[in-house]
Amino acid sequence: MLKKELGAVKFQEMQNKTFKVIQVVEKLCEFCDKPLSLEEKMVKTIRISSRNDYRNLFVRAKAHDRVEVDPEENKIYLYEHDYPGDVHPNCAKTMAKDTSEI
Ligand SMILES: [Zn+2]
C-alpha cells in the first residue's frame, strides 16, 4: 500500500483513472490525540479526466483534515477527526495516576 499526500501526486499519475473515494474517520483519544480506531467507508468513485478534475480535488481537500492518494490501488482517502469521548486504556491509567497525585 502506497499512500501519498494529495499534494505529492502529479496530475499525470491520476489522469484517466477512476478512483474509489474512501472516507476515513480517525477516532482520537481525548487524552493524547492519537487514534483509538479508524472507520473506513467508500463514499463514491470519481474519474480524473482533466486538469480541472484534478484541481477540484485540491479545492475539496480543504474541507478535510488531510487527503491521501494511493495511485496504484486507485484510491483517494479523505481523513476526518472525531472525538468519541473515549481514551486509550493506558491513557486512562495515566489520567487516574495524575489525578491521585494532586
Ligand atoms: Zn491516548
Image (cartoon, grey):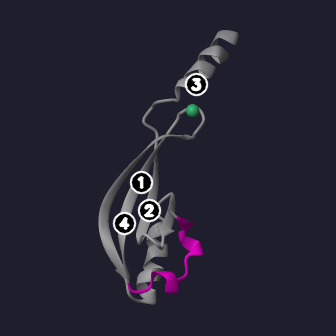
Between 85 and 5, the residue placed more toward the observer is 5
Would you name the residue on which mark 2 appears? 77
The number of discs equals 4
The answer to whether 72 is drawn above or below residue 64 in the figure is below
Circle nearer the N terminus (3, 4):
4
Circle nearer the N terminus (1, 3):
1
Q: Are marks 1 and 2 in contact (CB under 8 Å)?
A: yes
SS state under label 2: strand
Q: Residue 78: name its quadrant.
A: bottom left
Amino acid carrying mark 4 in the image: Val
Find residue 8 and report its horizontal and vertical position in percent: 59, 74
Amino acid carrying mark 1 in the image: Val
Amino acid carrying mark 3 in the image: Asn
SS state under label 1: strand
Q: CA distance from mark 2 to mark 4?
A: 6 Å
Find residue 62 and report its horizontal and vertical position in percent: 49, 66
Highlighted range, magenta? 2-16
Circle nearer the N terminus (2, 4):
4
- Say if the magenta span includes residue 48: no
Q: CA distance from mark 3 to mark 4?
A: 34 Å
Q: In the rendering, which numbered label is found on residue 39?
A: none
How packed is label 3: few (under 14 Cα within 10 Å), some, or many (20 or more)?
few
